[in-house]
Image (cartoon, rainbow, N blue to C red):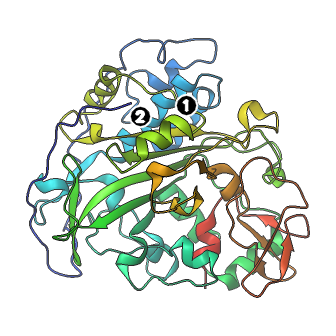
Amino acid sequence: MTIPISTGRTGIARRPAGSRAAAAVLLLTAASLALPQGPAQAQDATGDMACVGNGWFDKSDADFAADCAAMAFGDSLADRETLAWMFFARVNRMIADTANGGMSGTDQAPLWMSWPSDPDTFDTRMPFDFGAGADHAMQPSAEKKDILAGRVSTEDPDGANEQVTRNKISYDYLVDNGLTTKRDLASFFTDNEYVDMPVGSIELKASWLQVTPGSPVPEGALTFTFDSGEYWWRGLHIMVKMQSLSDPSQVFYSEDPSWFWTTFEFNDNPGVAEVRDALITQRAPLSSDEIAAILRAAGLGDAGLQAYAPNGTQIRFTENGEGTVPVILGHTDMEDFAGSPNTAQPTYWTRFEASCHSCHATAAYNPTSAEFFPFSVPTGALHPGYNMADKAGVTHYLGQGYKSLDFMWPIAFQTH
C-alpha cells in the first residue's frame, strides 16, 4: 500500500552538545474521541470497544495494553493493523522541543525520544529523568551484524544508527529487578525461573540514516538533528507486552501470545513495497482514510506520520499457531541481514528470513554457565534442540538449562 505523503523536509535548529530540553510539555492531551466505526473497529464479542473507545489515546500504557489484549490476539489482521497504528500514534504523541528544532523543524519531538535508551538503562546507575525532554545524543545500540560476527561496538553512531528506547514500566522493572548488570542478573536467577515483563511494557527501536550531500533526505521523510548531525527517520520497531503466559517458563515453545509486534517503515525505502507485498506474511493495510482518522483522533493529523506504515504484525511463531508456516516480519534496514540474495538490495530479495517473535524468543540466560544464548535469527516454532554456535565455536542448545528473558534481547546485549 502507498500512503500519500504530506510532510516534506524543513530545516531544524541544532542544540548544544550534551544538552536536553529543560522540560517535556505534553502538547496533545485531548484526543479522547472514539475511532470511527468501521470493519476493524466494530465492537464484537471480544469487547474491542474497550480498546478503541473514548479515551484510548490518554490511557496509561498498562491500561491500554490490558484493554487491547483481546483485539491484539484475535483472528482479524485488520484489527491488528488498526492496533499497530494506535500504538504508533501513542508513542509519537508530541512533546515540546522548542530550543532544538524538534522533528522536521516543528519545535516538537515524539514522546518516545524522551524515554531511556539502552545506555540510559544499562550503562549507568543514575536514575533516569523522564521529564528531561527529547534526547539529542545519538546513542545507538549494538549493530546486529557485529553481534553475529562475535563483535559488539557501540562507539560509531554511523555503524548501526539504531536506538532502543523503553517506557517507564519496562525501565522500572529492569532496574528494580537488577536486570541491568550481569552480576545482578545472576542473582535474579537464584530466586527466579524466568523474566516476566509487566503488562504495558513497551520496547522500541528506531532506525536513522545520517544526512550527507551524497545521501539526502527522501521527500516526505521526517528528520531530527542530533549532536552528531542531521538524520532522517527510517522506521520504528514496536513491541508491547499485552498479557503474561499462563506458564511463562514456556516462552520458548508456546504459541499462546503475550507480546504484540509491529514494525513501521518509511514508505519509500528502497524495496520496501516489494518486501511488503511478496515476503511479509501477515498484513492488512488500512486505507488512507482509516489511517487519517486514527491520527486525527490522536491529534497527529499534521505530523507527517502517514509517510510511514506497518510492514505487518506478529503475535506468535507460526500462522494460526499450528507450528507449520512461519510468520515473517521485519524491517528492510534493521533486518537487512535476513534478506537474500543481496542484503543491501531489498528490491531484489527473493527470501526474507525475519521473525520478531522467533528471534526474540531465544533471548535467554543459562544460570549454570552464566552465558547468554547466542544471537540468531530463527523463523517458525522453536524446540529444545534448537542450537547456535557462539563466537568461540561452542554450540549451545536452547533446552540445556536456558531461562527465558521474556523476549528481551537488550538484557543479553547490554548487561556488563
At x 35%, y 76%, the residue is 158
Q: Nearer the viewer, residue 74 or 69?
A: 74
Determine crowd level at label 1: few under 14, some 14-19, many 20+ residues with C-alpha closer than 10 A: many
x then y, percent, for residue 213: 15, 70
What is the distance, in whole Å, between disc 2 and disc 1 at their CAs?
10 Å
x then y, percent, for residue 129: 35, 69
What amino acid does circle 1 point to?
Cys
At x 21%, y 41%, the residue is 303
Q: Which residue is mark 2?
A: 86
Is residue 230 at least partly visible in the picture?
A: yes
Q: Nearer the viewer, residue 284 or 140?
A: 284
x then y, percent, for residue 66: 58, 35
What amino acid does circle 2 point to?
Met
At x 14%, y 79%, the residue is 16
Which disc number belongs to residue 68?
A: 1
Is the C terminus in the top left, top right, bottom left or bottom right quadrant? bottom right
Q: Nearer the viewer, residue 375 or 134?
A: 375
x then y, percent, for residue 203: 51, 56
Seen in the picture, residue 61 relative to 365 is either above or below; the reply is: above
Seen in the picture, residue 211 relative to 219 is either above or below; the reply is: below
Determine crowd level at label 2: few under 14, some 14-19, many 20+ residues with C-alpha closer than 10 A: many
Image-quadrant location for residue 52? top left
Residues at discs 2 and 1 in contact (Cβ within 8 Å): yes
Q: Is residue 287 left or right of residue 72?
A: left
Total number of numbered discs in the rendering: 2
